[in-house]
Structures are given as C-alpha cells and as structure tokens.
Amino acid sequence: MSFIVMGVSGCGKTTVGELLAKKLNLPFYDADDFHSQANIDKMAHGTPLTDEDRSSWLATLATKLGEWEKAGGAILACSALKEKYRDTLQSKSTEPLHWVFLDGPKELLLERISGRKGHYMHSNMLDSQLATLERPAYALRLSITSTPEELMNQIATALEKDPTVGTKPGV
C-alpha cells in the first residue's frame, strides 16, 4: 500500500507524511529529494517549473513508486499539482495509490513558507502553484488548520473505515 501526501508548498506534506510512515510502518520519501539540480536552481531563483521540467522527475518517481510497491509500499510527499502528474505517478504501480490532499488557506500557507529557513521554494512562487493546482475529487481531502498529529490520525481513521480511501476510481 502506497500513499502520496500532496498539496502546494507549505501544506505540511513532509511532516504529515513522516508521521503517517511511522504510524503505518512504511518508508517515507520526499519527492523534492529527487529533483535535478537544474530544477532546484530554477526554483531557487524564483522561476516556477514547467511541465517539461517536471517530466523526468515524475517519471523517476513513478518508477520508484513501482519499486516501493513491490517492497511493501511507501509514503511519498509530492505536490502532484495536476491530474496528468498524478496519472504519471500511478503509471508504474499495479495497485491504486492512496491520495491525501492537504489543503488550506493561502494566508496560512504563506506564513509557513515564510517561516522556512534554507528551502529553495520561496513564498513568491505560491501563486503559481495555486494557479496550477487541480484539486482531485477522489483524494482524502484534509484541512491544514488541523495539527500534523490530528491529520495523521484522520488519515488512519479513514483508512480503518475504508481501505480504499483516497484511491482513484477505475485504477
């Protein structure tokens, strides 16, 4: 069983993903760790990535998700902003991925991003991410106004009630 904790920068993907990984005893990975240096440099200079910039990164993540599935699953923190990106991420897995969408007010996202130190994603790029975001109706959608621990517990409770929670129909 594999999960993608998704959303725009500042929503808490990494924090919630790490907590969920511990709860479910699965390895955790951050999609940011798989970006090319060129992509990191581009974002560090305040330039949003294009679909072309993301294509090899998403292909790598899809391959890794397929490998992690064979090893028992994983938790991946990934923005996964567009449906076509999510389709690519699903493409190498035989089982449906579980999608957890962390969503919340722009003001809170900006506050969190502004409080980061040493991260290449700057607050001036949040608007481009929000404009790009295609909200998935099938994902387990949670509000970032809850604490990370509350979010992790909400995910675990939803999974106990429905083992298919957050999966895309027809996959």
Image (cartoon, helix red, strand yellow):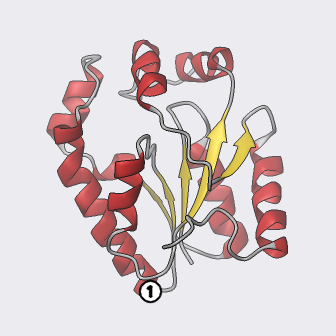
Instruction: Name the spot of residue 160 as percent of width and height, x first.
Output: 82, 74
Is 123 left or right of 149, judged from the image as shown? left
Q: Quadrant of the N terminus?
A: bottom right
Residue situated in front as seen by the camera: 51 or 28:
51
Position above or below: 23 against 49? below
Residue 156's quadrant in the figure?
bottom right
Instruction: Name the spot of residue 157 as percent of width and height, x first.
Output: 84, 65
Is 121 left or right of 101, judged from the image as shown? left
Residue situated in front as seen by the camera: 65 or 115:
65
Position above or below: 124 against 137? above
Helix, strand or loop status at disc 1: loop
Residue 17's quadrant in the figure?
bottom right
Instruction: Name the spot of residue 120 as percent of width and height, x first.
Output: 35, 27
Looking at this view, name the residue that lies furthest to the front. Answer: 170
* Residue at screen point 75% across, 59% down: 155
Residue 139's quadrant in the figure?
bottom right
* Residue at screen point 42% across, 48% down: 83
Residue tagged by mark 1?
Answer: 71
Residues packed near mark 1 inside 10 Å, few (<14), some (14 to 19) or many (20 plus): few
- Tell me which amino acid carries mark 1: Ala
Residue situated in front as seen by the camera: 34 or 97:
97
Position above or below: 163 against 142? below
* Residue at screen point 64% across, 42% down: 102
Instruction: Name the spot of residue 148 as percent of width and height, x first.
Output: 74, 45
